[in-house]
Each structure stands twice: as C-alpha cells, then as structure tokens.
C-alpha cells in the first residue's frame, strides 16, 4: 500500500466518521428546535452559559462542560462550517441543546431560572430547548 492510498483511505474514514457524527447530532436535536429562535436568543444564552459556568454551586463537571461549550462556540472551527447555508449554524444550536439538557439534569432547572438574563418568553424557549416541561401556572405564583 502506497502512502497515497493510505492518505485517501484515512481521508475517507474521517469523512465517514464526520457524516456519522452529523447524523447523530441531527437525530439528537430537540423536536421543536427552531434555528431562527435559537439565534435570536444567542446573546442571552451566552450570558446564561457564562453565569452557570461561574456559579460555584453548580457541580464542577458541569462547569467544565460549560466552559468547553463556550470555547467551542467562540472557536472559528466547527463541525459544519458556518458558511454552509442553514446547517452551518444548526450544529451549534444542536450542541447547545444537548449541553443544556445535560446541565439541567445535573444542576436542575432552578439554575437556568436563577441565571437567565432575558425575558420570560426567552426562558420558556430555553426550557423547551433543554427538554424541560413548561412550569405550571402556580409555580410562578408561588415563586413571586
């Protein structure tokens, strides 16, 4: 086997691995994920992630994952380049949704509510993105 055929085989294997990862991310996306809504919430979402990552009451493993997520979002290197229409930003939204689900499992939905800097409608969208049910109407009354 020559170095050329080895290089082609390696590139083909990496391409197949990348495609499998894309399919896995697409299947793991929340059912009601709306890219446009996710992009509109991005500034508040980044502030939420920073606040959660800096909160010492959040478990250390969760904070580490959040800092890694923030680094990934800030990085110019993506699974799908951002110049690819629609899919370029969809991978970021899917990864954020997966991370939010993981964070809420470990830190609890109260952490999201305590650190959310945006509007109540935005929080409702973030709760849906994280796979959380909408709170019952008396939950807001008892916390007020």
Image: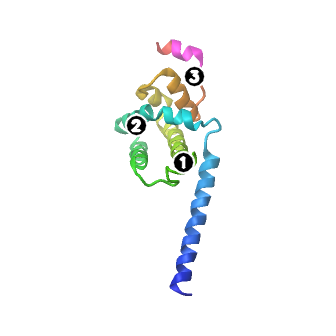
Which of the 4 image quadrants contains residue 45?
top left
Please give the residue where the numbered disc 3 appears in the rendered image: 135
In the image, is residue 56 above or below residue 76?
above
Q: Nearer the viewer, residue 114 or 7?
A: 7
Pair 3/1: label in front:
1
In the image, is residue 61 above or below residue 113?
below
Given contact means CB atoms under 8 Å apart, are the residues at marks 2 and 1 in contact? no
Pair 2/1: label in front:
1
Disc 3/disc 1 C-alpha distance (Å): 28 Å
Disc 2/disc 1 C-alpha distance (Å): 26 Å
Given contact means CB atoms under 8 Å apart, are the residues at marks 3 and 1 in contact? no
Q: Nearer the viewer, residue 139 or 123?
A: 123
Please give the residue where the numbered disc 2 appears in the rendered image: 58
Q: How many marks?
A: 3
Neighbours of disc 1 within 10 Å: few (<14), some (14-19), many (20+)? many
Image point (47%, 22%), residue name: 119
**Magenta stretch contains residue 139:** yes
* Secondary structure found at label 2: loop
Q: Nearer the viewer, residue 20 or 89?
A: 89
View extreme (bottom): residue: 1
* Secondary structure found at label 3: loop
Residue 82 in view in this figure: yes
Please give the residue where the numbered disc 1 appears in the rendered image: 91
Span shown in magenta:
136-141
> Looking at the image, is mark 2 or mark 3 earlier in the sequence?
2
What is the x, y in percent for residue 13? 58, 70
């Amino acid at each position: 086997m020559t170095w050329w055929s080895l290089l082609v085989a390696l590139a083909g294997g990496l391409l197949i691995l990348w495609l499998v990862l894309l399919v896995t991310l697409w299947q793991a996306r929340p059912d009601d994920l709306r890219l446009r809504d996710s992009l509109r919430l991005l500034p508040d979402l980044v502030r939420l992630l920073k606040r959660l990552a800096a909160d010492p009451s959040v478990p250390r493993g969760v904070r580490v994952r959040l800092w890694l997520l923030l680094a990934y979002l800030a990085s110019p290197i993506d699974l799908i380049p951002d110049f690819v229409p629609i899919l370029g930003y969809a991978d970021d939204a899917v990864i954020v949704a997966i991370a939010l689900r993981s964070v809420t499992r470990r830190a609890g939905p109260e952490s999201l509510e305590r650190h959310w800097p945006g509007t109540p409608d935005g929080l409702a969208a973030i709760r849906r993105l994280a796979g959380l049910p909408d709170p019952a109407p008396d939950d807001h009354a008892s916390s007020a």
